[in-house]
Image (tube, rainbow, N blue to C red):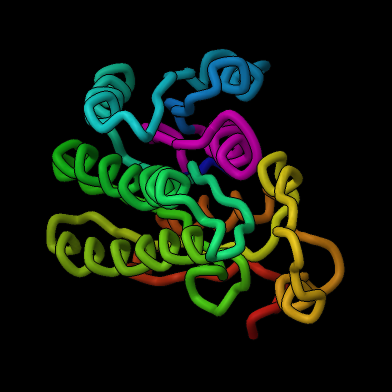
Amino acid sequence: MARFTGRRALVTGAASGIGRATARLLAHEGAVVVGLDVDEAGLVETAAGLDGAVVPLVCDLLDRTRVPAAVDEAADLLGGLDVVCNVAGIGGFRNDDEQTLDDWDRILGVNLTGTWLVCQAALPHLRRDGGAIVTTASTAGTDGTPYHSAYSASKGGVIALTRSLAVTHHREGIRVNCVAPGPIDTPITAQYTLPPGADPALVATILPFGAPGLPGEVAAAIAFLASDDASHVNGVVLKVDGGKTA
């Protein structure tokens, strides 16, 4: 497949997991990709073996000055932008009475504010020729998930942001859609630990049917939404959860 031949793409969170799988999939399908992440070593691994089709760009989404500059830098490197995939995210399980304000701010800062800053900075570039934005939420933003207040709030915000951007900018030729994965086997989720005293009955509601999904399965959904195959798809939230929330 070569759905992205000649396309210029920015992928955040590209150093590992879903972001890495997305950057590499778009590159394999013909795109030239700037992979953005705070993890420089991970970005180098993502770009390995792709003959320059993925260009690493280091940026911390918590740096509100750096993010717009990094998006502009990516557009300059690529000669424009056609696709923006917001995949970067952080989280973890917390008891609500142990959730610190600093941790709350950090999770919302990366997942929601960081996504908004990338989209805002990308809009002037996407307006030139039209394009597609894909955000990454979670089933924690669509369905009740225990021990996940900050993460759930951030991902619910991403969904609302996606829908607002979609209706605001569709006449400019910009589509904005969202993927909402369930549990996915990534390096980040592998580090999650349940909070002290977690209720086993509540924990069971988090678990997927069978095994967790794979990063490549979410990347495939992102690529669909970013491609011309989804030219009449705008403002949707596509769950990738193996039917867990059906």
Which residue is the extreme one toward the front? 97
Residue 119 place in picture, x, y as percent: 27, 46
Q: Quadrant of the N terminus?
A: top right
On whether residue 12 falls in the magenta region, the answer is yes
**106 displayed left or right of 50:** left
Identify the residue at horizontal 65%, vertical 16% (top origin). 48
Is the residue 76 above or below the residue 179 in the image? above
Number of numbered discs on residues: 0
**77 displayed left or right of 14:** left
Q: Quadrant of the C terminus?
A: bottom right
Identify the residue at horizontal 54%, vertical 17% (top origin). 40
Which residue is the extreme one toward the right? 210
**205 displayed left or right of 174:** right
Q: Is residue 242 shown to the viewer in this render?
A: yes
Residue 22 place in picture, x, y as percent: 57, 41
Residue 60 place in picture, x, y as percent: 40, 28
Q: Nearer the viewer, residue 8 or 140?
A: 140
The magenta span reads 4-30
Q: Nearer the viewer, residue 97 or 82?
A: 97
On whether residue 63 falls in the magenta region, the answer is no
Residue 153 place in picture, x, y as percent: 42, 65
Identify the residue at horizontal 50%, vertical 66% (top origin). 149
Q: Nearer the viewer, residue 50 or 196?
A: 196
Q: Is residue 85 shown to the viewer in this render?
A: no
The answer to which quarter of the image holds residue 213 is bottom right
Is the residue 198 above or below the residue 71 in the image? below
**158 displayed left or right of 219:** left
The answer to which quarter of the image holds residue 49 is top right
Is the residue 163 above or below the residue 76 in the image? below
Identify the residue at horizontal 54%, vertical 78% (top origin). 143
